[in-house]
Amino acid sequence: MENLFIDITEKKIFDVEKIRKDFPILSRLVHGKKLVYFDNAATTQKPKQVIETIQNYYSNLNSNIHRGVHYLSEAATKEYECARKIIQNFINAKHLEEIIYTRGTTESINLVASSYGYSNFKEGDEILISAMEHHSNIVPWQIICQRTGAKLKVIPMNDNGEIIIEEFDKLLNEKTKFVSIVHVSNSLGTINPIKYIIDKAHRLDIPVLVDAAQSIQHLKIDVQDLDCDFLAFSGHKIYGPTGIGILYGKKKHLIEMPPYQGGGDMIMSVSFEKTIYNELPYKFEAGTPNIAGVIGLGVAIRYVNNIGIEVIEKYEKELLDYGSSLLSDMPELKIIGNAANKASVISFIIDNAHPHDVGTILDREGIAIRTGHHCTEPVMRRFNIPATSRASFSFYNTFEEIDVLAKSLKKVINLFN
Ligand code: 7TS
């Protein structure tokens, strides 16, 4: 297949070979073979623009922010706040102070569960999540339910790995106090109808959090259009560094919510008698943050913008369709997650072969895939399997790499059958 992808509407030319040169790791060998990196849902690789920015930060700018009057501190603060603006524009948040820096999706969800949940939930309230949540969108709600007496309710899914929307409609009621839902499932690839879910919940005045850990890098997200109350994602899944993530929250909620952690930077003034909290977004950013991570994330998002998220979405859809067609031609292989609307994730099982063996054999061929429950144990239980193998694609992957995967999978199938 031709890898040069031309998007007519965007008039952008997508040259994957040129893009690959920006990612130094993609040209390395693994076990003497060319690396084929298909573990993008776990974390994405970083372009040299991000790597160089981080190196430059520590070489030329390193300083603590918001505290110094000296040159370096002011320069670092400027870069740090400039990244916030890039992120605001990227998701089209109305206000800059609606962008909160966290450690990642996990911390963003914990922040909301702990701060919003603890002050708003009470005995008998219901919190709605789906059957395909990552553990980080289950456990924080379980913890807050234990503390407040609220109950966790789960929207079931069908055999294709799609939310049963009629069940969602039935589960929503006057006891429901919050909906927290994954946009794209990391273990099935399902794209959930979040716009419908948000609209429906809002009719009953119920706030909705969207876990965008697996969608921010694949789909265009406009928080004002979606009208979600909160949105969480991780920098490392969108070509940025680890240890930095974003919580978007509507200002009206963030103003009312108590701080999640106390410490430096989140205060206006402190005395032993009374502490006055800082304004947004700093109220939720206690302590010295991941400054290099924030600046690196800003550059990563700028990199994605330069390619264009719509262009990325189209190219990745072609990769998904190509991979799905090759893998569904293998009778001994079964794809888990066949939703009508999917992002570039293919989970599968192979007759007589444990996913860990599949992963180990592919690794010897230089192919990195993920095997296991992908932190979605309830999904595995729903499909009555212990684990899957998962190949997840990014815009720097090629059709040839998918051919390499298919060829190696045929070898695995022959070995075990
Ligand atoms: N939500 C979803 C849907 C995810 O896929 C992940 C990570 C998280 C939350 C947590 O993100 P973190 O950056 O805070 O850890 N998913 C995966 C995965 O599929 N393989 O490794 C991590």
Image (cartoon, grey):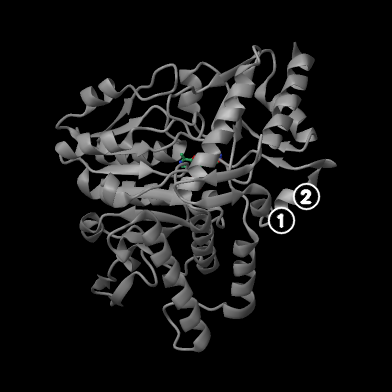
Q: Quadrant of the C terminus?
A: top right
Residue 236 x, y percent position in the rendering: 54, 52
Name the amino acid type tagged 1: Pro
Quadrant of res 92: bottom left
Residue 49 x, y percent position in the rendering: 61, 64
Please name the residue shown 51% across and 16% down the image. 384
Please name the residue shown 62% across and 73% down the image. 56
Quadrant of res 281: bottom left
Residue 28 got which mark? 2
Residue 210 got which mark? none
**Secondary structure found at label 1:** helix
Residue 171 x, y percent position in the rendering: 23, 25
Farthest residue to the bottom: give it.
70
Side (left or right) of 374 relative to 275 = right
Mark 1 and mark 2 in contact (Cβ < 8 Å)? Answer: yes
Side (left or right) of 301 relative to 55 = left
**Secondary structure found at label 2:** loop
Could one spot residue 358 in this view of the protein? yes
Quadrant of res 34: top right
Residue wearing tag 1 = 24
Name the amino acid type tagged 2: Arg
Residue 166 x, y percent position in the rendering: 26, 21
Q: Mark 2 near ligand 1 (CB under 8 Å)?
A: no
Please name the residue shown 70% across and 36% down the image. 401
Farthest residue to the right: give it.
32
